Amino acid sequence: MSIYENDTEDGVSTEDRIQVTRPPMFKVLLHNDDYTTMEFVIMVLETVFNKQIETASQIMMDVHKNGIGIAGIYTRDIAETKVALVHDLARTNQHPLKCSMEQA
């Protein structure tokens, strides 16, 4: 089916554009704690969120100074996957790093 529907009931062709809405977006948040190292947070930002070292360092400082930082904004499925990856990576490396998501 194309994005246009044709109605030729009366011999007159009309075109109605089908509305496509964008999916809701979600912020993936990293939370500060007293045990996870800054180096580990930067590594997570580089590997899970594909951030460059400068950007990862800035987000890490936001987490450190403000208690929370935005790692990225994604669709629901991608955000959920990234949260799970962060938790698995943190658990494997024995860090209590908390990661969550909220609608943007």
Image: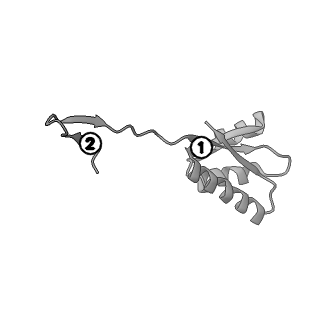
Q: Residue at x 34, y 39 (%)?
A: 18
Task: Classify residue 100 as left or right of residue 9.
Answer: right
Q: Residues within 10 Å of mark 2 (few under 14, many from 20)?
A: few
Query: Mark 1 or mark 2, which is nearer the start of the sequence?
Result: 2
Among all residues in the image, which is located at the extreme right? Answer: 34
SS at badge 2: strand
x, y percent for residue 42: 67, 50
Residue 11: image x %, image y %? 13, 37
Q: Nearer the viewer, mark 2 or mark 1?
A: 2
Numbered circles on residues, count: 2
> Would you identify the image quadrant in which residue 95 lies?
bottom right
Q: Residues within 10 Å of mark 1 (few under 14, many from 20)?
A: some
Quadrant for residue 6, please give it: top left
Residue drawn at x 79%, y 43% is 32
Residue 15, position as x, y percentages in the image? 24, 35
Residue occupying image coordinates x 27% and y 47%:
2
Q: Nearer the viewer, residue 86 or 44?
A: 86
Amino acid identity at mark 1? Gly
The residue type indicated by label 2 comes to Glu
Q: Which mark is residue 72?
A: 1
What's the residue at 22%, 39% (across, down)? Answer: 7
Give the structural element (helix, strand or loop) at label 1. Answer: strand
Residue found at the very far front of the displayed protein? 10
Q: Quadrant of residue 44?
A: bottom right
Residue that mark 2 sits on: 5
Report, in whole angstroms, how far the alpha carbon at label 2 lies from the one at label 1: 37 Å
Image height of 90 relative to 27, above or below: below
Residue 65: x percent and y percent?
A: 77, 34
* Residue at the bottom extreme of this rendering: 92
Q: Residue furthest left?
A: 11
Quadrant, the C terminus: top right
